[in-house]
Image: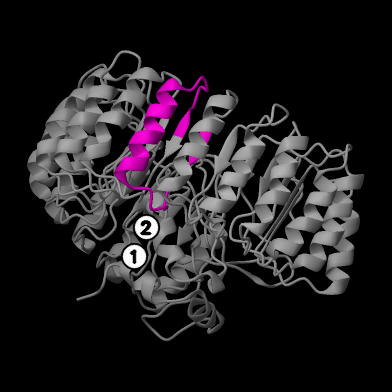
Amino acid sequence: MREKGWKRREKRGRKEWAERKKEGRGKKGEGRGREKREGIEGREYSKKGRRGEKKEVKERGREENTEKRGKGSGEGGAADALLPVRRRGATPQGGAERNGTGGLCGRAVTAARRAWAGPGPGRGGTGGDLFSTFKMDLDIQCEEMNPSRWAELLSTMKSCSTIRLDDCNLSSSNCKDLSSIIHTNPSLKELKLNNNELGDAGIEYLCKGLLTPSCSLQKLWLQNCNLTSASCETLRSVLSAQPSLTELHVGDNKLGTTGVKVLCQGLMNPNCKLQKLQLEYCELTADIVEALNAALQAKPTLKELSLSNNTLGDTAVKQLCRGLVEASCDLELLHLENCGITSDSCRDISAVLSSKPSLLDLAVGDNKIGDTGLALLCQGLLHPNCKIQKLWLWDCDLTSASCKDLSRVFSTKETLLEVSLIDNNLRDSGMEMLCQALKDPKAHLQELWVRECGLTAACCKAVSSVLSVNKHLQVLHIGENKLGNAGVEILCEGLLHPNCNIHSLWLGNCDITAACCATLANVMVTKQNLTELDLSYNTLEDEGVMKLCEAVRNPNCKMQQLILYDIFWGPEVDDELKALEEARPDVKIIS
């Protein structure tokens, strides 16, 4: 039996994927490597969804220089997730593109607002230097910097408002030059240096530029840069001296509780106007909460706080929530994924929901809160003061019993737009309850993620009914469920209804065969609002893929992304896909 993609991805490092990519066109059934689609961030096909991806990637080790996402994911969405280099037969998390110098870019290019993991804003980037008439000035991913190339870029940086150099093998010596750029370029607003071995010495050089009066930097990204607590004193001085700095992303660094306590001292300085603080994977413990609460009390400007993937535990989270209730800040985003939370913390989190109408994005995925904890959270979610928009509850040990409470939230909370319930054992009975709620006129949900929730064809009639009634739902991730051809045929009835407004549909690993592809092709041609379809990990064979290709050739088909990971076909289909790329360059077929 084929392993699920997210499990296989855990076993394979980035180097192995790169080697496979270089092999080029394979034998029959292997196919050839195909271009990675932009915007895949956040929508990676991992078990956990956009935010949960980070945990699994982190476990592969810092030496792989992976780039993480985030909720947002709200963030986050952002957040960015690494997608290793892929070829046909690889997992959907795989992906690589070639940058302007011919190097491979293994970073997930994040779209402006569809972190497909799940949701979460991000940044685009196609490798090489990319100049845009919009926000982006210089965006380079995964390029080895030789001296001549670096000198060439330095002259360009002098006039950039945004510089992104993720995973470019930069070191502390490069930071000397960047410090000079910061000093001499007052128009520079964003600096992104994720996944570079800058070290504490490099940050010290950078901060010399950041401390100059001419610096007006607003956003600083230093994720996975091999920083320790020693860097925090330098960063504290920047927070204290630069009121222009509104975002600081220092996740995936071994700052520790001691280092972040020093950062909190900078936050408490009256000159600090920070709005977003990202501290994921910083090896924090429960002892950090007292310092964080003091900073929250002193910093009303703070809007986003991400503490995911730190071993805080219930006692610390309770203390943090009590501090948030008392704080004057209008927090909009709170991420506490994989923080060792159980149902014991949920009453306090619920109190934050009911007392902070500013809170729009809550992520508590990968915590074992169970049905009991979810019931407590729903008390806060249902409070009139709660204006939540994004709710991430993946892998929270929920069962169908939770769906009764969630249904009340779905049908009464008109502000709620995005929900992830990935990897919870909801079963058909739970899904049917959710569907009944989604047919309520007050249900305005736009995105629902129910991958790997133990669903079968038995719930598809209820889902189809929602599709034919609810005009708000635009994104449905229902992959990794055993729907089969019969279930998907029923779903297509709802998809074809005039009221259906689905833009993105994910049916990966749903036991679909070629027999279902004629119906899916009809949906692709008929529903012009459907722009993204994932059929990965299904046994479509040549016959099924050819039917899909025929649909893409139809001028009525408005598909932008057709995702066919881990589907094997012969050279005839491969030639057809190559011809299709030339005939429909506006369509990206990801395989």
Q: Could you say where residue 327 lies in the image, as x and y percent from the top left?
A: 48, 23
Q: Are marks 2 and 1 in contact (CB under 8 Å)?
A: yes
Residue name at image x 52 percent, y 44 percent = 78
Categorize mark 1 by other alpha carbons within 10 Å: few (<14), some (14-19), many (20+): some
- Is residue 102 a member of the stretch shown in magenta? no
* Relative horizontal placement of residue 405, taking residue 317 as reference (left or right): left
Q: Could you say where residue 154 lies in the image, as x and y percent from the top left?
A: 87, 58
Q: Is residue 116 visible in the rendered structure shown here?
A: no
SS label for mark 1? helix
> In which quarter of the view is residue 362 placed?
top left
Q: Could you say where residue 224 lies in the image, as x and y percent from the top left?
A: 59, 60
- Residue where numbered disc 2 is placed: 45
- Residue where numbered disc 1 is placed: 6
Q: Is residue 244 above or below residue 279?
A: above
Numbered disc in front, either 2 or 1:
1
What segment is highlighted magenta in the picture? Answer: 304-333
Q: Could you say where residue 392 lies in the image, as x and y percent from the top left?
A: 34, 40
Q: Is residue 220 above or below residue 292?
A: below
What residue type is disc 2 on? Tyr
Residue name at image x 32 percent, y 41 percent = 315
What residue type is disc 1 on? Trp
Query: Disc 2 to disc 1, how far (Cα)?
Result: 7 Å
Residue name at image x 60 percent, y 32 percent = 275
- Is residue 312 a member of the stretch shown in magenta? yes
Closer to us: 160 or 192: 192
* Relative horizontal placement of residue 568, taking residue 134 as reference (left or right): left
* Relative horizontal placement of residue 542, taking residue 110 as reference (left or right): left
Q: Quadrant of the N terminus?
A: bottom left
> In which quarter of the view is residue 56 placed?
bottom left
Closer to us: 305 or 11: 305
SS label for mark 2? loop
Q: Residue furthest top?
A: 384
